[in-house]
Image (spheres, helix red, strand yellow):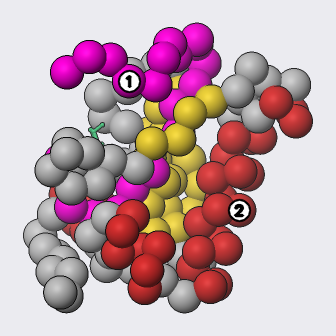
Amino acid sequence: MAYEYDSENIFAKILRGEIPNNTVLETEHCLAFRDLYPQAPEHILVIPKGPYVNFDHFGAEASDTELADFSRTVARIAKEIGVSPDAGGQGYRLIANTGAHGVQDVPHMHMHLIGGRVLGRILQQA
Ligand code: DGP
């Protein structure tokens, strides 16, 4: 089954510059910006510039270059904002909500990088 990308989603508009964002870091293949509704002192969204619907799509079809750039970008941001344990920070959580059970709202692949406080257990009872 082919992935269907909706080019009118909000992150596609951010990538096209149609909607402003608070950019943290931009690379050749990724954009990272602050979440509009932060759940913690640090809440950054890292997105690939390519038209991937979710992690399922990205992990299956992105090039090795895109995948490597994405991982390196996430790790670099964690260091730059000071949450990386390697940079003296207290750690962080990565979340890529995917599909209906993942409760993904925006259909453009994104990784939440969340930190700056103790985040509790990974899941709460639904
Ligand atoms: P998810 O449920 O994983 O699809 O999370 C989508 C996130 O996107 C949510 O935490 C709020 C954030 N968000 C939604 N619209 C905007 C926007 O226009 N700008 C920014 N910076 N974040 C947005």
Write down the quadrant of residue 28 in the picture.
bottom right
Q: Quadrant of ligand 1?
A: top left
Q: What secondary structure is found at the residue carrying circle 2?
A: helix
Q: Which residue occupies 21% across, 81% down?
A: 3
> How packed is label 1: few (under 14 Cα within 10 Å), some, or many (20 or more)?
few
Q: Which residue is mark 1?
A: 123
Tell me, yes or no, if residue 15 can be seen here: no
- Asked if 116 appears above or below 81 in the picture, the reply is above
Residue at the location (15% across, 80% down)?
4
As drawn, is 118 to the left or to the right of 5? right
Instruction: Name the front one of labels 2 and 1.
Output: 1
Amino acid at pointer 2 = Arg
Residue at (62% x, 85% y) in the render: 64
Is 59 a magenta residue?
A: no
* Residue 90 falls left or right of residue 54: right
Q: Is residue 109 magenta?
A: yes
Q: Upstream in the sequence, badge 2 or badge 1?
A: 2
Camera-side residue: 101 or 64?
Answer: 101
Which is nearer the eye, 123 or 16? 123
Image-based side of 27 in relation to 47, left or right:
right
Instruction: Locate residue 40, reporting x and y percent.
Output: 46, 19
Considering depth in this image, is 126 or 59 the residue closer to the camera?
A: 126
Q: Would you place residue 114 above or below residue 21 in this image?
A: above
Give the residue pinned by disc 2.
72
Residue bounds of the magenta highlight: 105-126
Query: Which percent across, then down, holds residue 115?
Result: 58, 25
